[in-house]
Amino acid sequence: MIDHHHKFIFVHIPKCGGCSIAKILNTLPPIVDNTGHRTLKQIFLMHPGCENYFKFTFVRNPWDRCVSLYNFWRQQSYDHPWTYHDKRQMDFCKNHSFLNFLKNLNSPELDRVHTKPYFTHYFSSEQRYNFVGRLENLQADFNTVCNKIGIKEQELPHENKSKHKHYTEYYDKESRKIVADTFAQDIEYFKYKF
């Protein structure tokens, strides 16, 4: 998302509270240009000359993100373009079918944008942010963003919510390790713990 009036770029990493943030930012006049889940590098190519805008994104604990993604997919009543081909057969912990699916990042069925590790996809040397918020501190970090881009602080809605228990209740030792191995750079870079 890019706003040439307020001079900011929001990189929307999937399942990190981005739909809630976008709902507020889309109300800003004039119309904000929605860039989907494109990387900062891709946005620069689409909008040359905006490199000095305030650039921000949000990240999330990978163990929590995987549970949210799993439950979001399972709750869809339609065939979303990036859902697993037989989501009814996916299981999070028993047989680890969902997590093994995510682990195979080159799978042709996988929309990698929704499941790629943050660090390798959104944090290359060409993609430098002014602020990286965390879903765990979503409202407080969004208030920081509001102050930086010069808009009033607003309470975020909870968009795209998936219903599930606390993420720690979904894991056994093996499934914790699958996520730890798959998202190792994210966990190390952002100092996340289970």
Image (cartoon, rainbow, N blue to C red):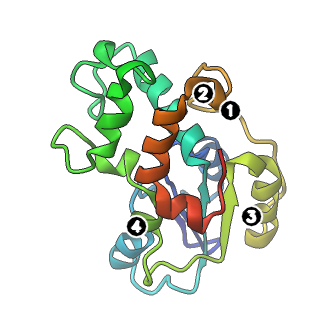
As measured in the structure, the alpha-carbon distance from the residue carrying label 4 to the one carrying label 1 is: 27 Å
- 128 on left or right of 103: right
Q: Which residue is mark 4?
A: 120
Q: Nearer the viewer, residue 161 or 92?
A: 92
The numbered mark, 4 or 2, whose residue comes first in the sequence reads 4
- Secondary structure, mark 2, is loop
Residue at horizontal 43 percent and vertical 52 percent from the top: 181
As measured in the structure, the alpha-carbon distance from the residue carrying label 4 to the one carrying label 2 is: 26 Å
Q: Quadrant of residue 146?
A: bottom right
- 50 on left or right of 104: right
The numbered mark, 4 or 1, whose residue comes first in the sequence reads 4
Q: What amino acid is at disc 4?
A: Thr
Horizontal and vertical percent for residue 121? 39, 64
The numbered mark, 3 or 4, whose residue comes first in the sequence reads 4
Horizontal and vertical percent for residue 34? 45, 55
**Disc 1 + disc 2, Cβ < 8 Å:** yes
As measured in the structure, the alpha-carbon distance from the residue carrying label 2 to the one carrying label 3 is: 22 Å
Which disc number belongs to residue 158? 1
Horizontal and vertical percent for residue 85? 21, 24
- 98 on left or right of 16: left
Is residue 133 positioned above or below 131 on the image?
A: above
Q: Nearer the viewer, residue 109 or 129?
A: 109
**Disc 1 + disc 3, Cβ < 8 Å:** no
Q: What amino acid is at disc 3?
A: Val
Residue at horizontal 71 percent and vertical 35 percent from the top: 157
Q: What amino acid is at disc 2?
A: Lys
- Secondary structure, mark 4, is helix
